Amino acid sequence: QVQLVESGGGLVQAGGSLRLSCAASGRTSSDFGMGWFRQAPGKEREFVAGINWSSTSTRYSDSVKGRFTISRDNAKNTVYLQMNSLKPEDTAVYYCAGGSVSWPFAHPREYDCWGQGTQVTVSS
């Protein structure tokens, strides 16, 4: 069973940047896609970004496209989410997820494992 651990969350002012990391422990296969989701208070969990094993396919939600970048380093079993030009509406708990998923990466039920979440707070 793959376990995922996120890090890198915190408090940042609007317009600032953060980079989230998600380290996977355990054996992953070449079809192990990964994604980032977020959940704000009182709202449903929403898709943020996804990436396939080979990094040849990525997808972003419209709300973060052009500001966030997902990447992965398979040698380190780690996926990253670089978040730039942060807005107060980006405030949420961010979760990474993994599984045998491919594009469009957006459906939570397709993921087999989830991290515990990391809080991102953007102040205005």
Image (tube, rainbow, N blue to C red):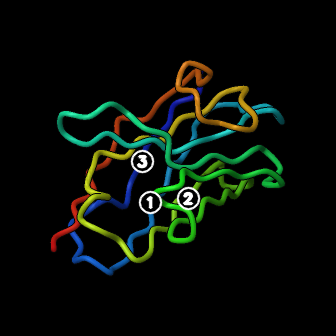
Return the disc, 2 or 1, that comes first in the chain's sequence: 1
99 horizontally vs 120: left or right? right
Q: Residue at x 42, y 47 (%)?
A: 6
Instruction: Indicate the position of residue 86 as horizontal and vertical percent values.
Output: 35, 71
Identify the residue at image location x=75%, y=34%: 102
Q: Which residue is mark 3?
A: 6
**Does label 2 or label 3 sit earlier along the sequence?**
3
The residue under label 1 is 20
Secondary structure category for the residue under label 3: strand
Q: Is residue 74 left or right of residue 13?
A: right
Q: Going 26% across and 56% down the picture, which residue do you hit?
A: 91
Q: Secondary structure at mark 2?
A: strand
Nearer to us in this view, 123 or 53 = 123
Q: Does the residue at mark 2 contact the one at mark 1 (Cβ under 8 Å)?
A: yes
Name the residue type under label 2.
Answer: Tyr
**Mark 1: few, some, or many residues within 10 Å (few <14, many ≥20)?**
many
Say what amino acid the circle numbered 1 marks: Leu
The reply to whether dot 2 and dot 3 touch (C-beta < 8 Å) is no
Q: Which residue is mark 2?
A: 80
